[in-house]
Image (tube, rainbow, N blue to C red):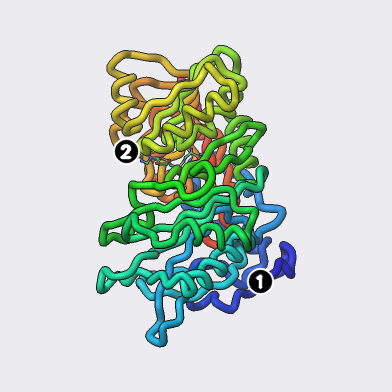
Amino acid sequence: MARQEKAGQAQVCPLAKKCGGCDYQGIAYEEQLKKKEQTVKKLMKGMGEILPIIGAEDPYCYRNKVHAVFSRRRNGEIVSGIYQEGTHKVVPVETCQIEDQKADAIIGTIRGLLKSFKIKVYDEDTDYGLLRHVLIRTGAKTGQIMVVLVTRSPIFPSKNNFVKALRAVHPEISTVVLNVNERKTSMVLGARNITLYGKGYIEDELCGCRFRISPTSFYQINPAQTEKLYKTAMMLARLNKRNVVVDAYCGIGTIGMVAAKTVKEVIGVELNGEAVRDAKVNAHLNNMNNIRFVEGDAGVFLEGMADREETVDVVFMDPPRSGSSEAFLQSLLVIRPKKIVYISCEPQTQARDLQALKKDYKIEAIQPVDMFPMTEKIETVVLLTRKE
Ligand SMILES: C[S@@+](CC[C@H](N)C(=O)[O-])C[C@H]1O[C@@H](n2cnc3c(N)ncnc32)[C@H](O)[C@@H]1O
């Protein structure tokens, strides 16, 4: 589907009812933003000043990460798309309003190639077949594209010819990775990556820094809005040259590296080992020697800092949807940084965590940012300052 209409006009996707991925289908973008503001106001009423939501200039085709699950119909036809909400039934998707259009085209080509290369798609019920999913990641600034073929087994017949045929149609592909997921699981990616073509990762740029992104590392899915999100976080933190900063749940080190330009020292902590490896490379890529990264649970790491009576000026925290842990929040109250900048993609768990911090911290500002147009998902940045 081409980008036929612009913000302010509702563009209805024919798959809206079946797919369920875009809860705000058919609702004009301005109206979507109002609804999100209302949701934040309801959840965080009386907690602090809620600023007007930062919307997107273009609410379409923003997803730089596109995931397609593959399935075979009774008549043998291969389809790819997404699981219908709450089921494991595949809704065929050829193009999507919010996905990168190049990624959709590559997935279409792979669908066609499977037949000519006689590659069977994986069947969950029988545990038979090879190709489970395809994941495409694109670097908005660099134009680099990573194709991840998620398979049941590491043996992919005629893999070199397959890659050659794929690149003949899409020479823009920078790297192709085989991700082996041998488990009977709903998790998309397995632990093992085998590079079939290129470097096995892509690079992208955000806020003037360059980042390497490996297949399983987290990277924000809406690059234009991510720059606004990070700039908002920096503006709220009002960093200075003397600051020691923690970037908790740091992924590939993006927030920490943007902060490192201004401060004395940054320590990033992240559970995913592949993301930590990316983060360390990224520090070199950006010539930064005032930032280091620790692999591990953020709560355990902060408990250690509290035990050692270490001091920190600012903590950025950006946990997964489930929010932060009790250990992390309690340790924050012991370390008592002057400021906490809490970024979240799930304001419900964020509101819960803010309650725990409220006794020692004042909530100065709550800034919603629309990272996920067409869906009801909301991102918020909250600034907390220590009560003296
Ligand atoms: C929402 S992402 C944020 C990443 C990064 N701040 C960014 O903007 O790209 C959350 C990150 O937390 C990591 N994570 C999840 N649980 C964790 C834990 N217990 N301790 C440390 N990191 C964790 C995930 O692997 C993921 O990279």
Report the residue at 33% width, 22% height from top.
334
Q: Position of residue 255 (x, y in %)?
A: 54, 33
Could you tell me residue 139's position as x and y percent? 61, 46
Along the viewing direction, whichever of 278 and 16 lies nearer the viewer: 278
Q: Locate residue 33, reporting x and y percent.
A: 62, 57
Ligand 1 visible in quadrant: top left
Point out residue 299 in the picture as x, y percentages from the top left corner. 32, 32
Residue drawn at 59 percent across, 29 percent down = 258
Is 119 rendered above or below residue 259? below
| Secondary element at tag 2 | loop
In depth, the one of 265 and 208 nearer the eye is 208
**Quadrant of the image containing the N terminus:** bottom right
Question: Which label number is shown at residue 283?
Answer: none
Q: Which residue in the protein does label 1 denote? A: 1
Q: Residues within 10 Å of mark 1 (few under 14, many from 20)?
A: few
The verdict on label 2 being within 8 Å of ligand 1 is yes
